[in-house]
Amino acid sequence: MQIHHSAAILAAAVLLSACASAPTFSQQALPAAVQVPEGNKVAMETVGAGDITYECKAKKDAAGQFEWTFVGPDAVLSDRSGMSVGKYFGPPATWQGNDGSKVTATQVAVAPAGAGNIPSQLVKANPATGSGAMTGVTYIQRVATKGGVAPAGACAAANLGAKETVKYQADYIFWKAA
């Protein structure tokens, strides 16, 4: 009985590792604006979950009007099995691996991701600092977003400077040159 039980555990582990390494991400369903250019391949898939902070500020070039303004993210990046592999924070927007390597990026495009969700996004990575998972990253996609939009509460002169955090989740797909 003990041998049979061990064999079942081994078979389950092999199946799980095969599932974990199988490609689970496809760009075909994404808007063209946030698709990664040819010549790049998926290097790492992560799920970011955490908070986005907004601040009530005066609207630029609109006297007497106010709006919630994006301040920055604070999220844990996990692999598809749920293990923490890094973090995402800012400003500036920074993705950092648990190995200490990190990368910042410049936005290329956004595309709507449904009501109540921050948009999908494509960013072009700047050269990484440190050596590790972020070394050689060319693009990062933010897809499958859930939540993260500015607070629904009032933003007015009375609460100017107030900060609020909202929960969000998104897949961050890291690409490297093929």
Image (spheres, rainbow, N blue to C red):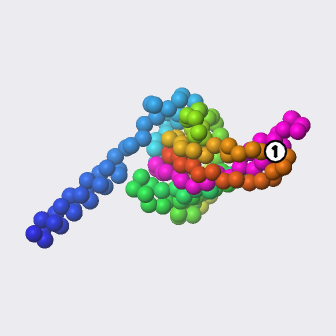
Q: Which residue is farthest top?
A: 32
Q: What amino acid does circle 1 point to?
A: Ala
The image shows residue 96 at horizontal and vertical percentages of 58, 58
* Residue name at image x 54 percent, y 28 percent: 32
User: Residue 34: within the magenta?
Assistant: no
Can see residue 95? no
The image shows residue 122 at horizontal and vertical percentages of 58, 39
Q: Which residue is farthest left?
A: 1
| Residue 124 as seen in the image, left or right of residue 4 | right
| Residue 129 as seen in the image, left or right of residue 46 | right
* Residue name at image x 57 percent, y 44 percent: 147
Residue assigned mark 1: 156
Q: Which residue is farthest bottom?
A: 2
User: Residue 63: within the magenta?
Assistant: yes
* Residue name at image x 74 percent, y 54 percent: 163
The image shows residue 154 at horizontal and vertical percentages of 75, 44
| Residue extent of the magenta highlight | 44-70
The image shows residue 55 at horizontal and vertical percentages of 75, 50
Per the picture, the main secondary structure of the magenta-coloured stretch is strand
Q: Is residue 112 above or below residue 89?
A: above
* Residue name at image x 64 percent, y 36 percent: 108
Q: Quadrant of residue 62?
A: top right
Q: Nearer the viewer, residue 82 or 160?
A: 160
